[in-house]
Image (tube, rainbow, N blue to C red):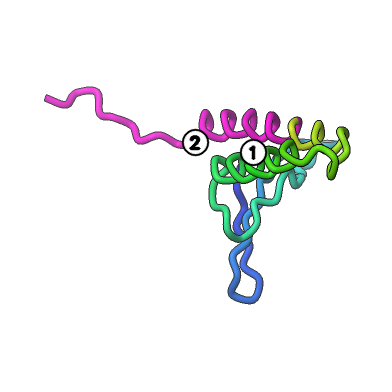
Amino acid sequence: MFIREKRIKDVLYRSLIESYREGGKVRQRLLYNLGRDRTTLAECIAWERRCLDSMRAHPRTFEAERIESRERLVAQLEEWEQVVVARSPRKRIPENVA
C-alpha cells in the first residue's frame, strides 16, 4: 500500500493505492482519493470525521445508511493508516554508536 502522486495541469493529486497479484501479474487498485488538499491519511481521517460529525448533527438531512457508510469509511481509513505507518521505511540506527 502506498500513496501515489499524480500531477494534472500543475495540480498535484494523491491517491491511496494497493498492489496485489492476479494470475501471476502485479495489479494495482485505487482504495481512496486523498484529493489535492490533503497530503496524509491522518488529514483524510480528520476531514472524514468532520463530515461525519456534520451528518450526525443533521440526522434528518442524511439517511442512516449514508452515515453508517461514512463510519465504515473512517474505520477503514484508520486501519489503512496503521498499515501504511507499519510499512513505512524507518531510519536504521547504527548498532555500534559510542
> Could you tell me the amino acid type at mark 2?
Ser
**Please, what secondary structure does the residue beneath circle 2 have?**
loop
The quadrant of the image that shows the N terminus is top right
Are there few (<14), some (14-19), or many (20+) residues within 10 Å of tag 1? some
31 to 11, vertically: above or below: above
Q: Quarter of the image holding residue 94?
A: top left
Relative side of 93 to 21, left or right:
left
- Extent of the magenta region: 72-98
Residue shown at 55% from the left, 45% from the top? 43
| Residue 69, quarter of picture | top right
Contact check, label 1 and label 2, Cβ < 8 Å: no
Q: Which mark is residue 88?
A: 2
The local secondary structure at tag 1 comes to helix
Residue carrying label 1 = 49
Instruction: Classify 68 as above or below 50.
Output: above
Residue 93 within the magenta-colored segment of the rendering: yes
Q: Nearer the viewer, mark 1 or mark 2?
A: 1
Residue 39 in magenta?
no
Q: Quadrant of residue 98?
A: top left
Q: Residue at x 85, y 40 (%)?
A: 60
Residue at (58, 34) in percent of width and height: 81
View extreme (bottom): residue = 9
